[in-house]
Image: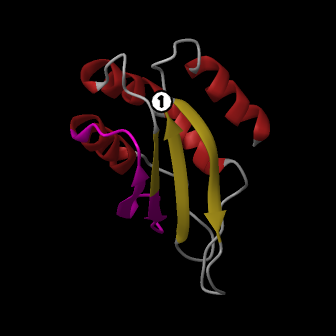
Amino acid sequence: MLSSLLAFAIATSFASDTPVAEEEEVTDLDAEEGHLPDGTVATVMSHSEAAVMDCSRRFGTRTTHGRIEFSWQIELDGSVSHLKMVESGLKNPLLEECLVATVKKATFPKPRGGTVHASHTFSF
């Protein structure tokens, strides 16, 4: 998990206005909760790097700085549902909207044993 996260962070941190992924959290909320291998959310989000960079180029500015945290549920088919922007310091609604659309499009491996709650933070 750490190596894929570091690779994504290194690959996206060369410019000061470029997003950097932070460690995701997959939390088992109860016994009905499903399971994905450690690092799955970071890996899938790293596959969305081009879309995140496109959002940053289209809607970010040189003064766009901050973090945006999302939480969502990964359904049995690997799709994203109940996506919520937990917190954003970007003060850029167009960039936030683009990032929401990017996370919504992500497809995860099918979780074992039920749905999985996940979160991910991007830093700009």
Tell me the crowding category of disc 1: few under 14, some 14 to 19, or many 20 or more residues within 10 angstroms, Cα based: many
109 and 106: which is toward the camera: 106
Q: Position of residue 5 (x, y in %)?
A: 68, 35
Colour scheme of the picture: secondary structure
Q: Is residue 32 left or right of residue 105?
A: right
Is 40 on the left-hand or right-hand side of 74?
A: right
* Nearest to the observer: residue 89 or residue 11: 89
Residue visible at 77% across and 39% down?
2
- Judge left or right: residue 13 versus residue 88: right
The count of marks equals: 1
Locate the N terminus and report the quarter of the image it occupies.
top right
Q: Residue at x 61, y 79 (%)?
A: 29
Residue at figure coordinates x 58%, y 65% from the top left? 111
Residue 45 versus residue 104 in the image, above or below: above
Q: Position of residue 68 (x, y in %)?
A: 44, 45
In magenta stretch: residue 81: yes
Looking at the rendering, the stretch of residues picked out in magenta corresponds to 71-93
**In the displayed image of the protein, which residue is found farthest to the top?**
14
Q: Hey, what amino acid is under mark 1?
A: Phe
> What residue sits 53% from the left and 57% below the top?
119
Query: Taking 43 as reference, is 118 above or below it?
Result: below
User: Looking at this rendering, what residue extends furthest in the bottom direction?
Assistant: 31
| Res. 28 image quadrant | bottom right
- Residue 28 lies left or right of residue 45; in this view the side is right
Local SS, label 1: loop
Is 90 magenta? The answer is yes
Residue receiving disc 1? 124
Relative to 112, residue 86 above or below: above
Query: Where residue 91 sits: x, y (%)?
Result: 30, 40
Q: Position of residue 96 (x, y in %)?
A: 30, 42
